[in-house]
Amino acid sequence: MIIKTFVSGPVSANTHILTDEDTGDAALIDIGECTEEILSALKDGKINKLKYILLTHGHFDHIDGVPELKKHYPDTPVCIHEADAPCLYDDLLSLARGFGEPAREKIKADIILHDGDILPFGKSEIKVIHTPGHTKGGVTYLVGNNLFTGDTLFRLTVGRTDFPGGDFDELNDSVMRLFALPGDYNVYTGHNISTTLDYERQHNRFVKRKKR
């Protein structure tokens, strides 16, 4: 599995491009801006097909590049959890209007995701884990030993919960669900640098461990 990360958009969100080396299938996770750098990376000779456009949640800084990307890849499905799907066509729900972002072309999801969904990907698979709290429809994608957490879990911190739909207790439960996964994982976040699940289990002080 090849994973490349690009930073783009108005608040420097991460776009991750995954490529299955055996089949050349690729998946793109979040895109705040459809930059030439990202488009060039998708034309890499190791990529045969962009199979999915995967969104971790519906905030504008993670979805604003989708309409432009769809012009280049009209047959690639846009995938988002059912609770955040309206953000793709509602600038108020995506927070774009509240942050003064210009209106963008409205689109709709091609694949509505639910907790536990499995998407075939090359010789592997992408598992959808519903991780609400930052938004109602936040998800984490599990691919091999890699977690793509969006704005749920960051290095040494967690996502904001002061936006509409945010709920700290819900977010805490989501992070604890990730912590309960067996073994260690690489964690690719929606902003800033990557981390590992073991590191966050040991050092992330924003997570409230419930007493048993």
Image (tube, rainbow, N blue to C red):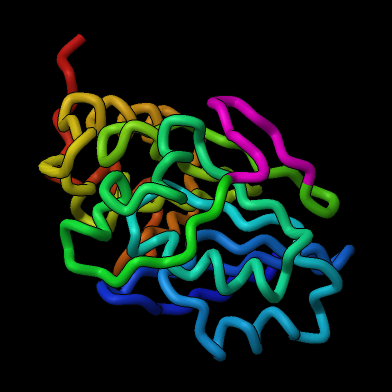
Where is residue 147? Give x, y as percent: 50, 49
User: Image quadrant of residue 142?
Assistant: top right
Taking depth in this image into account, of 95 and 41 the one nearest to the observer is: 95
Instruction: Residue 72: give x, y in percent of width and height.
Output: 70, 76
Q: Residue at x 55, y 66 (%)?
A: 67
49 sits left or right of 93 in the view: right
Examine the rendered structure and indicate whether residue 103 appears above or below residue 94: below
Point out the residue furthest to the top here.
212
In this view, 145 is above or below 43: above
Q: Is residue 19 magenta?
A: no
Image height check: is 35 above or below 26? Answer: below
The quarter holding residue 4 reads: bottom right
Quarter containing the C terminus: top left
Please indicate, yes or no, whether residue 32 appears anywhere in the rendered image.
yes
- Seen in the image, is 16 located left or right of residue 72? left
- Taking the spot 64% from the left edge, 29% from the top edge, the residue there is 117
Q: Which residues are magenta?
A: 109-120
- Classify residue 178 by image quadrant: top left
Tell me residue 111's x, y (percent): 66, 40
- Can residue 193 be seen by looking at this rendering? no
2 or 50: nearer the viewer: 50
Which of the two residues, 8 or 74, is positioned nearer the viewer here?
A: 74
Left or right: 70 in relation to 104: right
Q: Position of residue 9 (x, y in %)?
A: 35, 76
Identify which residue is drawn at 17% across, 47% down.
Answer: 160
Horizontal relation, residue 98 to residue 121: left or right: left
Q: Is residue 119 magenta?
A: yes
Looking at the picture, tell me which residue is in the foreground, 116 or 201: 116
